[in-house]
Image: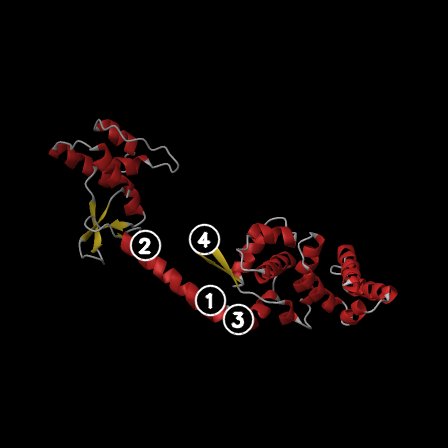
Amino acid sequence: MFHRQAQQELELEPLEPHLQAELDRYYWESDEPAEMLAARFDIELPPGNGPRRVPAGTRLAEYVTPLDAPGACTRCGTQLVFLSRADRRDDRRSCMFCGHSEPEATCNCDRCTTERAERAASRHHFWRQRLCKTDFARFAVDDLDPEAASLYWALCYLTARDDRPVSWEDARTLSGVRSLDAPAERLVRSHLVFLRDGRFELNPLTPAAMRGTRGEDAAWRPYAAAVQHGRGNDDELLQLLEYLVPDIRTLLAGADDRALEAALDHAMMAHPDLATRAVREATRRYAAEARRA
């Protein structure tokens, strides 16, 4: 706690007993500003500037006897106290013996901090087991807006490629979203992404899981984007082509360029976001290399 640490660091000189009693009475029983009380008792308050400004009332509390508060510490049974006017106003009660404070939800003692971390880990484990399933993910992705869906499918694509860590920035580039904050937050709220210890875990789907649904094109969009950016490999290109052109393997095995171009024309009409110029050029290259082989 700031004020107890400050008291130790500054090694404050105790006031005379009658002055201490007067200061306590004025501090706890009046609304006189802390700066005026400090001047009245010739007290030089420690600086309150820094990353987080400390009010004068809290700084003056270093010199004041803590006030008994209702209740005993739930950890050790010691009488709880108010350490400052702000604590009394907010009903924040502290234990001088073990460092615990009430309400427990905001206590930063070692035991409370550990217990909160354990509860958070337990909740994460529970929801991870309960919701990280294909059926739930397929249901949840259906309710996403276009930006969040694009980011989600980019994450799924990157995760499926290899075992290397996936970065949010890679997913942002691949998905084309301008900002990560809003769509990423929606993925977390939808339980399609789980945050834990500064990292994220994905509740993933494959394009195959979306077969026949209205979101199937969106699931394949990262494959087309990867080809566009020069990141897609031949296996991924072939997977995309099998979705766009059901008989693509037969066309690639033959030597009829006109039939292949006609099939790509049809694919472009049906899936304009997927059968892009880059995908068509990559298909021509793949077909030429396959024939030479």
Q: CA distance from mark 4 to mark 2?
A: 17 Å
CB atoms of marks 3 and 1 within 8 Å: no
Query: In the rendering, which numbered label is found on residue 128?
Result: 1
Give the residue type that dot 4 points to. Answer: Gly
Q: Label 2 sits on what residue type?
A: Thr
Task: Give the CA separation, mark 1 to mark 2.
Answer: 22 Å
Please name whichever residue, 46 or 176, is drawn nearer the observer in this view of the structure: 176
Q: Position of residue 177 (x, y in %)?
A: 64, 51
* Cβ atoms at labels 3 and 4 below 8 Å apart: no
- The percent position of residue 204, horizontal first and vertical second, equals 56, 65
Q: Nearer the viewer, mark 1 or mark 2?
A: 1
Task: Check disc 2 and report the residue beneath it.
Answer: 113
- Sequence-first tag of 3 and 2: 2
Residue named by callout 4: 198
Q: Left or right: where does residue 253 sit relative to residue 135? A: right
Q: Are marks 3 and 2 in contact (CB under 8 Å)?
A: no
Report the amino acid beneath label 1. Answer: Arg
Q: Residue at x 25, y 52 (%)?
A: 100
> Could you tell which of marks 4 and 2 lies nearer the N-terminus?
2
Depth check: give the residue in front, 219 or 119. Answer: 219
Left or right of residue 215, residue 130 in this image: left
Report how far apart the C-alphas of labels 3 and 4 lie in the structure: 22 Å
Disc 3: which residue: 133
Mark 4 or 2, which is nearer the eye?
4
Residue shown at the point (39%, 62%) measured from the top left: 121
Label pair 4/1, CB-CB below 8 angstroms: no
